[in-house]
Amino acid sequence: MHEAIGIVEMFGFVAAMKAADAAAKAADVKIIAIDTNKPANAEKEEVPLITAVKMQGEVSAVTAAVEAAAEEANRVTKLIQKHIIARPTDDSQKMAERVSVGRDRVGHIPNNA
């Protein structure tokens, strides 16, 4: 069985970095991924990047880390959602480890990955 997974979704990459930092300082968790999602209408309208910080550890540690990350996300931009999976399945573990950062196309910069 895998350790608990915590996911905190917010607007912006800077907010995600600050949230990940707050989570790692709040409890004994490992940041396993920072994932980005560019909304479908982002080409036509200026919309913020949606970013998720994913962490893993004991349930109590993940709970404390998710709360710290959520507070920091709200302080910097806006928290969208937070969730804890106490006992992830193998499939949930694979999805949590999925990372889009570095595979995205930002503006006119081509993907180098």
Image (spheres, helix red, strand yellow):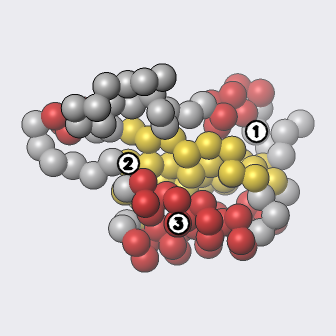
**39 or 14, nearer to the observer:** 14
Q: Is the Cβ of the residue at disc 1 closer than 8 Å to that at disc 3?
A: no
**112 or 55, nearer to the observer:** 112
- Could you tell whether 103 is left or right of 60 in the image? left
Q: Residue at x 21, y 49 (%)?
A: 47
Using a 10 Å C-alpha cutoff, classify the residue at mark 3 as few (fewer than 14 neighbours), some (14 to 19) or many (20 or more): some
User: What distance separates the C-alpha of mark 2 from that of mark 1?
Assistant: 23 Å
User: SS of the residue at dot 2?
Assistant: strand
Q: Earlier in the sequence, mark 1 or mark 3?
A: 3
Q: Residue at x 38, y 25 (%)?
A: 111
Q: Is residue 3 visible?
A: yes
Q: Nearer the viewer, mark 2 or mark 1?
A: 2
Residue 5 location in percent, x, y? 71, 48
User: SS of the residue at dot 1?
Assistant: loop
Q: Is residue 15 above or below residue 1?
A: below
Which quarter of the image is occupied by the N terminus?
A: top right
Q: Which residue is mark 1?
A: 88
Q: Earlier in the sequence, mark 2 or mark 1?
A: 2
- Could you tell whether 90 is left or right of 78 in the image? right
- Could you tell whether 58 is left or right of 108 in the image? right
Residue 41 location in percent, x, y? 18, 36
Residue 24 location in percent, x, y? 70, 64
Q: Residue at x 72, y 33 (%)?
A: 93
User: SS of the residue at dot 3?
Assistant: helix
User: What distance separates the C-alpha of mark 3 from that of mark 2?
Assistant: 14 Å
Q: Which residue is mark 3?
A: 18
Q: Which residue is mark 2?
A: 50
The residue type indicated by label 2 comes to Ile
Kindly indicate the quadrant of the structure image that contains residue 19: bottom right
